[in-house]
Amino acid sequence: MDSLWANIFRSTEEDSVHNLLRNIPLFDGLSRGELSGIASVLHRREYAPDEVLFRQGNPGVGMYIIREGAVDIVYEPTGDTLAELEDGDFLGELALLNESPRSATAIARDSSILYGLYRPDFLGLVEQDTDLGVQLLLRMSQVISKRLIHVNDQVQVLREQLEEKDPQRG
């Protein structure tokens, strides 16, 4: 009887992880089997308030998905909060492609539960299933492109604000 209940609860947790992944643009539209493959390499971690996920300047090792809680992205030299992320948001996806230094520090604002997808596991998935790998890399490029366009728009707004303050700069 215990194994029957264990199976019921295990499938509920698996469904919950699948639903979380489906809401991440990198994984939206993947089959249940593909989501299970990704879920099998996720690392669940709980963070206390004010605990650091990673520090600016450290090599990137993977991306994080916020299951519950909130994470602040902080620019270390000034202490400015660049972004406030919450349930269902993800961060650090560039680290899946390269190990370049983190551009900011990530700090849990609340008690938080996150899933980590680390570069070696991601690359293992890509090598194991090339069709899935192509889908993931294409979606990753789309996400990165959208974020780059957003940053470019922000830079343009800042330039315009600077020109308004000092017309001689433009």
Image (tube, rainbow, N blue to C red):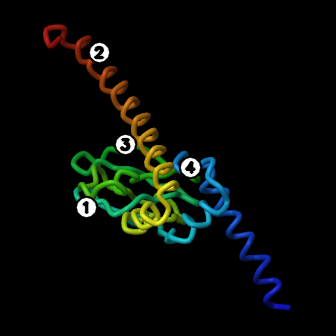
Q: Position of residue 130 (x, y in %)?
A: 47, 57
Q: In terms of sequence position, does the residue under pointer 3 or pointer 4 come before the other?
A: 4
Q: Position of residue 86 (x, y in %)?
A: 54, 51
Q: Position of residue 48 (x, y in %)?
A: 47, 69
Q: Secondary structure at mark 3?
A: strand
Q: Amino acid at mark 1?
A: Pro
**How many other residues sit within 10 Å of disc 4, few (<14), some (14-19) or many (≥20)?**
some
Q: Residue at x 33, y 62 (%)?
A: 54
Q: Amino acid at mark 2?
A: Glu
Q: Secondary structure at mark 2?
A: helix
Cα separation, mark 4 vs mark 2, equals 33 Å
| Front position in the image: 122 or 19 | 122
Q: Position of residue 30 (x, y in %)?
A: 61, 52
**How many other residues sit within 10 Å of disc 3, few (<14), some (14-19) or many (≥20)?**
few
Cα separation, mark 1 vs mark 4, equals 23 Å
Disc marking residue 82: 3
Q: On the rendered image, what quadrant is the N terminus found in?
A: bottom right
Residue matched to label 1: 59
Q: Nearer the viewer, mark 1 or mark 2?
A: 1
Q: In terms of sequence position, does the residue under pointer 1 or pointer 2 come before the other?
A: 1
Residue matched to label 4: 24
Q: Amino acid at mark 4?
A: Ile
**Residue furthest out toward the top:** 167
Q: Residue at x 50, y 49 (%)?
A: 135
| Contact, mark 1 vs mark 4 (Cβ under 8 Å) | no
Q: Secondary structure at mark 4?
A: loop
